[in-house]
Image: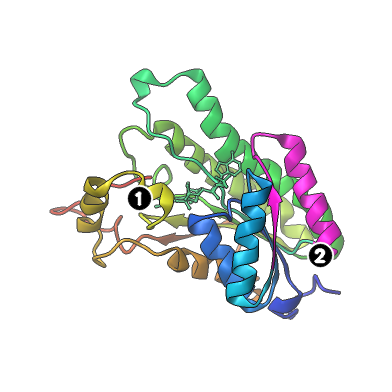
């Protein structure tokens, strides 16, 4: 059975939400390079299919695209069903898609809060739930969430709703990990620091310079830095790890004093 441990990457079926750019694209690319069957999602079907085609060409792997808006619970169910239809099963869910709009708390509306929680927290939870039937059937599953240092570890002005959503993901992860362990489904998370993506670059040069100066390893992260941590947590070698996190931040959250880091998103 393809769901059993020891199965090569080439027989693994992987979903990467938010795979059209940034960290998700990096994750999809790394799985494609291992030979896995990858479905990547974005809100627009044509964009997702185009990125999938590009990755399939550049990696020689098997990648397809799928439209998914995480605000839509029915679309999330459809994502799992469609992937099962394409691959026969789902082994790995990389629940990566997320948004980080900046808004001071004083100006934050309930709509702003709902939007961030709907995509980052409720969308993550529903994506995991949607993949459970196929994972339970095969008795194998790897869920890797893309959380953040912001919320679980640090704070940043303008991202209180975002921080709440990312910390909330970890509260979800711990209970889900215990609940799903009997099915041999593990649930873990990566906590990126400042990773060079389109989303981060939109914060502007000043922000990027400030962040870089606060990172002990002296550079922003690359999407591949996060992708390798995700690949490990999705591997057979990580079979005995569940409910845990790996911080991928170049040491940004370590300094106790002096050039103390400021962080986000
Ligand atoms: P990004 O470059 O802005 O990419 C975001 C991805 O999410 C895109 O593929 C986008 O696809 C998708 N997406 C946006 N809204 C969506 C929605 N409503 N439903 C479904 N998909 C949606 O972001 P990134 O920097 O790669 O961040 C990816 C994840 O890492 C997020 O969860 C973020 O919180 C986390 N993170 C990032 C950093 C960082 O430094 N970059 C640090 C910590 C954590 P379409 O636009 O094609 O729909």
Image coordinates of residue 108 in percent, x first then y, are 41, 21
Tell me where the magenta segment starts and ends, as one range: 63-89
Which of the 4 image quadrants contains residue 154? top left
Which residue has dot 2 on it? Answer: 87
Identify the disc placed on residue 57.
none
Taking the magenta stretch, the answer to whether it contains residue 78 is yes
**The C terminus, quarter of image:** top left
Q: Vertical placement of 21 versus 10: above or below?
A: above
> Is disc 1 placed on a helix, strand or loop?
helix
Q: Vertical placement of 7 versus 47: above or below?
A: below
Task: Please give left or right for residue 115 compared with residue 2 in the image.
Answer: left
| Residue 234 shows in this picture | no
User: For the point 69% across and 73% down, which residue is it?
Assistant: 36
**The N terminus, quarter of image:** bottom right
Q: Residues within 10 Å of mark 2 (few under 14, many from 20)?
A: some
Which of the 4 image quadrants contains residue 94? bottom right
**From the Cβ of disc 2, is ligand 1 less than 8 Å away?**
no
Taking the magenta stretch, the answer to whether it contains residue 73 is yes
Image coordinates of residue 245 in percent, x first then y, are 50, 58
Q: CA distance from mark 1 to mark 2?
A: 35 Å
Residue 169 versus residue 30: which sits nearer the camera? 30
Q: Vertical placement of 147 versus 117: above or below?
A: below
Which residue has dot 1 on it? Answer: 201
**Contact flag, marks 1 and 2 (Cβ < 8 Å):** no
Q: Residues within 10 Å of mark 1 (few under 14, many from 20)?
A: few
Residue 69 versus residue 160: which sits nearer the camera? 69
> Is disc 2 placed on a helix, strand or loop?
helix
User: For the point 42% across and 51% down, which residue is it?
Assistant: 198
Task: Please give left or right for residue 40 compared with residue 12 in the image.
Answer: left
Which of the 4 image quadrants contains residue 25? bottom right
Task: Please give left or right for residue 240 compared with residue 103 in the image.
Answer: right
């Amino acid at each position: 059975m393809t769901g059993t441990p020891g199965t090569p990457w080439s027989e693994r079926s992987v979903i990467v939400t938010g795979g059209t750019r940034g960290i998700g694209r990096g994750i999809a690319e790394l799985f494609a390079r291992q030979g896995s069957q990858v479905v990547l999602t974005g809100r627009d079907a044509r964009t997702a299919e185009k990125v999938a085609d590009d990755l399939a060409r550049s990696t020689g792997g098997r990648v397809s695209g799928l439209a998914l808006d995480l605000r839509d619970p029915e679309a999330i169910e459809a994502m799992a069903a469609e992937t099962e239809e394409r691959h026969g099963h789902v082994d790995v869910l990389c629940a990566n898609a997320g948004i980080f709009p900046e808004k001071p708390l004083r100006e934050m509306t309930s709509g702003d809060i709902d939007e961030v929680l709907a995509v980052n927290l409720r969308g993550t939870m529903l994506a995991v739930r949607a993949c459970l039937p196929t994972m339970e059937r095969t008795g194998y599953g790897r869920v890797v969430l893309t959380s953040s240092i912001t919320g679980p570890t640090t704070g940043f002005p303008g991202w209180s709703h975002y921080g709440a959503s990312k910390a909330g993901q970890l509260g979800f992860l711990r209970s889900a990990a215990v609940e799903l362990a009997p099915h041999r489904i593990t649930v873990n998370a990566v906590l990126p620091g400042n990773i060079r993506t389109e989303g981060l670059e939109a914060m502007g040069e000043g922000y990027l310079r400030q962040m870089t100066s606060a990172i002990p390893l002296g550079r922003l992260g690359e999407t591949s830095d996060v992708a390798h941590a995700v690949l490990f947590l999705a591997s057979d070698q990580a079979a005995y790890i569940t409910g845990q996190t790996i911080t991928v931040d170049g040491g940004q959250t370590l300094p106790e004093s002096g050039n103390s880091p400021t962080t986000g998103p």
